[in-house]
Image: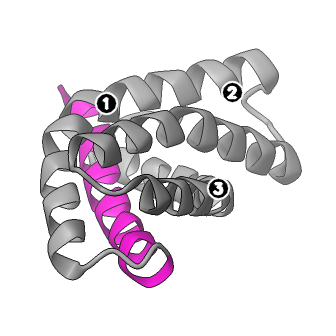
Amino acid sequence: MSRYLADTLAMVMFSTIVGALVEVVIAGLTAEQSARIRLAAIPVMLLIGRPYGIYRNWLFKLLGDRNTGQLKAVLIDTFANTTFQVPVYCCLLALNGVSIGQMITAAGSVIVIAALSGRPYGVFLVRCRRLFGVPARE
């Protein structure tokens, strides 16, 4: 249960802040559209927070080891975040009625944002896990 709570809390907090910034500042969605998407995302994040953590752990186990260097950790976190988050985000946009143009802009931006935020999210996730007494990687 601690693993679920740590991974889910990290996902909800980080994704809400970064997602709202992308939607409003970069993609040009209204505050109302962004609020609807962020609210719709919460149940999704409750479902995918832990699976993302498992996916990230698996990638580190597959591509790295316990003593992964900084560059390798950046690359793994970037890959994990991008390949997991972008498809989920596109589904949320589609379900919330944004236009095709807004979706393309938002998705394109999220690819960049996911790549840039991969490592910061990985570090944030590890810190949340420590708060809950969960190992950084299993």
- Residue 131 appears in the picture as rendered: no
The residue under the point 39% across, 48% down is: 130
N-terminal-most mark, 2 or 3: 2
Q: How busy is the neighbourhood of tag 3: few (under 14 within 10 Å), some, or many (20 plus)?
A: many
Could you say whether the residue bearing mark 2 is in a helix, strand or loop? Answer: helix
Gap in angstroms between the C-alphas marked 1 and 3: 18 Å
N-terminal-most mark, 2 or 1: 1
Where residue 83 sits in the image (x, y, percent)? 61, 34
Residue farthest toward the front in the current orientation of the protein:
100
The residue under the point 69% across, 47% down is: 78
Q: Is residue 138 above or below residue 46?
A: above
Residue 48 tag number: 1
Q: Where does the magenta region start and end?
A: 1-26
Answer with the quarter of the image where residue 24 lies: bottom left
- Looking at the image, which is closer to me, 6 or 16? 16
The quadrant of the picture occupied by the N terminus is top left
**Mark 2 or 1, closer to the camera:** 1
The residue under the point 24% across, 49% down is: 9
Q: Is residue 8 above or below residue 124?
A: above
Q: Is residue 62 above or below residue 45?
A: above
Residue 64 tag number: none
Q: Is residue 12 above or below residue 137?
A: below
Q: How busy is the neighbourhood of tag 2: few (under 14 within 10 Å), some, or many (20 plus)?
A: many
**Residue wearing tag 2:** 60
Kind of residue at disc 2: Phe
Count of marks overlaid on the render: 3
Residue 119 tag number: 3
